[in-house]
């Protein structure tokens, strides 16, 4: 069965728009240090994610790297638990209580660093005052 060209074009445009819909980090400009108590751990695609509350009781969406990358660099379901108090450093979304997490500390010890496939950290090449976590 042949598909009409209009259907093929529609499907192509739809797939292209989905590919471009993946968020970028360009809007996450403000750097933030924040203490969070973890309320939910959601490890899975497209990004591992933590939900936590700050000292004001505000709920934050905390975005980490994709799961395969995190596992490769040692971050897994044993790394954090509900109730953990963590210090985070990252970039805040301009309109939501959402953070691209660059570093996680527990008791002043580095627990997590956002890394790319090459192993390079997300802070390398940024204009952050921190050179690394």
Image (cartoon, rainbow, N blue to C red):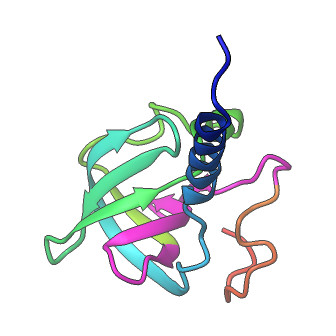
Q: Give the image quarter of residue 57.
A: bottom left
Q: Is residue 37 above or below residue 71?
A: below
Q: Residue at x 68, y 89 (%)?
A: 129
Q: Most extreme residue toward the right, as rendered?
A: 118
Image location of residue 70, percent across then percent down: 62, 41
Q: Give the image quarter of residue 81.
A: top left
Q: Is residue 64 magenta?
A: no
Q: Is residue 55 above or below residue 128?
A: above
Q: Is residue 98 above or below residue 42?
A: below
The quadrant the N terminus occupies is: top right
Q: Nearer the viewer, residue 59 or 35?
A: 59
Q: Most extreme residue toward the left, as rendered?
A: 57
Q: Residue at x 62, y 58 (%)?
A: 20
Image location of residue 80, percent across then percent down: 41, 42
Image location of residue 131, percent across then percent down: 75, 78
For the image, the number of numbered tags is 0
Q: Residue at x 65, y 50 (%)?
A: 16
Q: Nearer the viewer, residue 67 or 87?
A: 67
Q: Residue at x 19, y 75 (%)?
A: 55
Q: Nearer the viewer, residue 65 or 73?
A: 65
Image location of residue 124, percent across then percent down: 79, 72
The reply, left or right, for residue 84 in relation to residue 43 is left
The quadrant the C terminus occupies is: bottom right
Q: Nearer the viewer, residue 56 or 45?
A: 45
Q: Is residue 91 magenta?
A: yes
Question: What span is in magenta?
Answer: 90-119
């Amino acid at each position: 069965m042949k598909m009409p060209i209009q259907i093929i074009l529609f499907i192509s445009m739809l797939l292209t728009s989905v590919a471009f819909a993946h968020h970028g980090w360009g809007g996450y400009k403000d750097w933030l240090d924040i203490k969070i108590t973890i309320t939910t751990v959601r490890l899975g695609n497209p990004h591992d994610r933590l939900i936590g509350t700050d000292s004001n009781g505000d709920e934050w969406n905390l975005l980490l790297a994709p799961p395969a990358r995190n596992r490769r660099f040692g971050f897994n379901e044993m790394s954090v638990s509900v109730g953990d108090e963590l210090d985070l450093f990252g970039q805040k979304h301009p309109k939501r209580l959402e953070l691209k997490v660059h570093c996680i500390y527990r008791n002043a010890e580095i627990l997590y660093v956002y890394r790319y496939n090459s192993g390079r950290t997300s802070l390398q090449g940024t204009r952050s005052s921190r050179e690394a976590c």
